[in-house]
Amino acid sequence: MIYRGRFAPSPTGRLHFGSLVAAVASWLCARHAGGRWLVRMEDIDPPREVPGSARDILAALPAFGLVADEPLLFQSRRVDAYEAAFRRLRDEGHVFPCWCSRADLAAAGGMHRDGHCVAAPAPSRPPAWRLRVPDKDIVFDDGLQGSQRQNLRESAGDFVVKRVEGFPAYQLACVVDDAWQDVTDVVRGNDLLDSTPRQIWLQRCLDLPTPRYLHLPLAVDAAGRKLSKSEGAHPVDPHDPVPALRRALRFLDVSDDFAADHPEALLARALERFDPHRLPQCSVRSAA
Ligand code: GLU
């Protein structure tokens, strides 16, 4: 099967260094494998969306030499597919409605583990819907972080797949689209490592294939804080792409010691030397 990788930003701010690292690494891995690289805009969370940021991110990527091989996918246009997946989960008894407030949840130990809501049903307002998780370990081999094991019942609990506002949760939309786009390899930041067992469990409930996963070190600032685009930290400048691209390559331990004044030339030279087995194996790394 031909390698199919993707970069899946959320429109919560401008492209920042951490997302540039994920975009560059997923691009390098796809190109190195002779595969295809896709871009998916994860714009299904209107309350968190920063107006204009989807457009900014999509304009920045080609300025960094990163051009998708297929038309962009906007999750906001795929709500019917998420609803169909949700209905299947509901019809097969995998989900339950939950009216819990934060206080109810805190009183229940911060998590649901028993496959039912602890609050009284409130027919006047819509519930969130949670997926029942098993009391068993989900095991997978991460391409960089090695063998992973997580007991979903202990660590995540029954998690939300459809939110009170009616939007599909990230976990559900991501799994539906990774399958729909035939993604074989997910390369993304380590902040999503602990989402992966939940996604694998969803794939099993929906009879979807599980891609390979590779989680990159999380880029942190000098104080050890995650570079978060929602905090507006460290946007990268698409008008002067080469310095940020060089920093991203160095962050990934890819040599950048050659002259190149265009992002395309820099990426092409980096690709010649790129070996996914030499990516840094740590879980966090300073972006400084
Ligand atoms: N949209 C997610 C984010 O920007 C990433 C999703 C993924 O790569 O699975 O954090």
Image (cartoon, grey):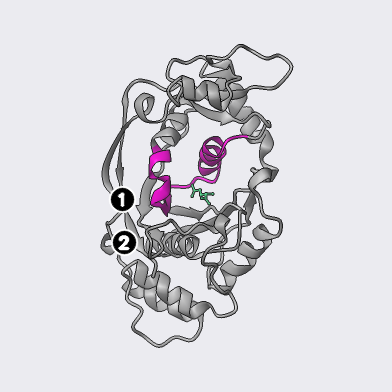
- Tell me the SS state at disc 1: loop
Q: Residue at x 40, y 60 (%)?
A: 219
Q: Position of residue 134 (x, y in %)?
A: 38, 21
Residue type at mark 1 is Gly
> In this picture, which residue range is highlighted in magenta?
168-196
Q: Is residue 86 above or below residue 193?
A: above
In this view, which residue lies farthest toward the top? 120
Q: Is residue 255 above or below residue 16?
A: below
In this image, 91 relative to 28: left or right?
A: right
Q: Position of residue 82 (x, y in %)?
A: 62, 34
Which residue is label 1 attached to? 143
The number of numbered discs placed on residues in the rendered structure image is: 2
Q: Of the residues under marks 1 and 2, which one precedes in the sequence? A: 1
Whether residue 220 appears in this view of the structure is yes
The label number, if any, that marks residue 276 in the structure image: 2
In this image, 176 relative to 156: left or right?
A: right
Q: Residue at x 30, y 62 (%)?
A: 279
- Tell me the SS state at disc 2: helix
Question: If the image is split into quadrants, where does the C terminus sit?
Answer: bottom left
Whether residue 1 appears in this view of the structure is no
Q: Position of residue 202 (x, y in %)?
A: 47, 30
Q: Residue at x 56, y 63 (%)?
A: 15
Q: Is residue 178 magenta?
A: yes
Q: Nearer the viewer, residue 158 or 72?
A: 158
Is the Cβ of the residue at disc 1 closer than 8 Å to that at disc 2?
Answer: yes
Q: Is residue 230 above or below residue 125?
A: below
